[in-house]
Image (cartoon, helix red, strand yellow):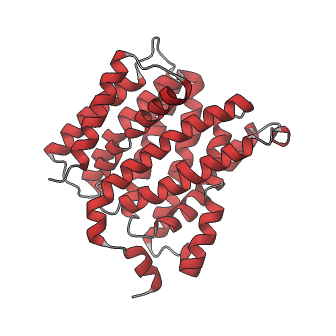
Amino acid sequence: MSNDSIAEGGNGKAGLKSGPALVALAAMLWGTAGIASKVVYSIEDVPPLVIGFFRLALAVPLLAIWCWSRLGPTTFHFPGRDLLRILALGASIAVYQVFFFAAVPELGAALTALITICSGPVLVGLGAVLFLGETFTRRLGISLGFGLLGAGLLVGVPSGGGSLVGILFAAIAAFAYAVFVLFSRMLAKHDPGKIIVVGFGSGAIFIAPFALVSANGIGTWSTSVWPVLLYIGLIPTALAYLLYFRGMRSTPATAASVLALVEPLAASTLALALFGERLGFPAVIGACFLLVAMMALLRRP
């Protein structure tokens, strides 16, 4: 067995015990990205898409060095169809970033998040059954229902409508998210670090032209912006996705998409603790539903 295979194989028994927990932990770390972005906005008027670009670009260099020290040239080796899959994963995360942030001016942040958060797991569930051969169990269906209802209540249904163009953009973002999750599951046998290096590296290249167009005045940004951007790249991106891709080895795609709904719960909890942002009664009920969904998936049968 090659060194790459040893590094990627891991301990199957440990993965079966901890996979969903690792995905949930990753989602909690993702929730800190929104709080950190809020800190960036309070310092400089940085376009969200630019933050999305740096989130990918800053996650890659240190992981590339780490992976090269362990795996050597195989860091960039994805045999056969896996090469197309890793490039598709990178493209999907880039498409998600571009269309999510394009939908926000048309719909507002709340409605955009509601559409992507609630439709993403449904699309993942359909794709997992059709393309991965996963079984949609009763337990998973109940968890999905509680998770979607909880996320909807937590995010809230905004007043007023939105443009059809904005809805289309949000739907494309949700579809791209589903593609990302499905390819994550297909590629989970590989070392998590190399998935980030190649997948996110290609995603950063895809998104760079869109981000650079809107990155006016980057040379005049306050130096205090960069440590926050570095945090976003290293903790809720590099570290979180290391946990996520490791957890995906033993977590069905649909279950992972439901566990990812913990992200808005973590963000809301941090906003309450750090900024004193209060949750309304529906949001509290939604948080309880999300906890029920998470515990149902984390509990061993």
- Residue at image location 80% in from the left, 36% down from the top: 216
Compared with 63, 244 (above or below) is above
- Residue at image location 53% in from the left, 25% down from the top: 109
- Residue at image location 33% in from the left, 53% down from the top: 21
Instruction: Specify whether 294 is left or right of 57.
Output: left
Compared with 7, 152 (above or below) is above
Q: Can residue 178 be seen in this view?
A: yes
Instruction: Specify whether 173 is left or right of 219.
Output: left
Horizontal and vertical percent for residue 40?
68, 35
192, 281: nearer the viewer: 281
242, 169: nearer the viewer: 242
269, 3: nearer the viewer: 269
Can you tell which quarter of the image residue 220 is in? top right
Compared with 61, 156 (above or below) is above
Horizontal and vertical percent for residue 64?
61, 68
Residue at the right extreme of this rendering: 220
- Residue at image location 43% in from the left, 42% down from the top: 175
Instruction: Specify whether 105 is left or right of 120.
Output: right
Quadrant the N terminus occupies:
bottom left
Q: Is residue 73 visible?
A: no
Tell how many labels. 0
Horizontal and vertical percent for residue 201?
61, 59
Residue at the bottom extreme of this rendering: 1
Instruction: Specify whether 112 is left or right of 252.
Output: right
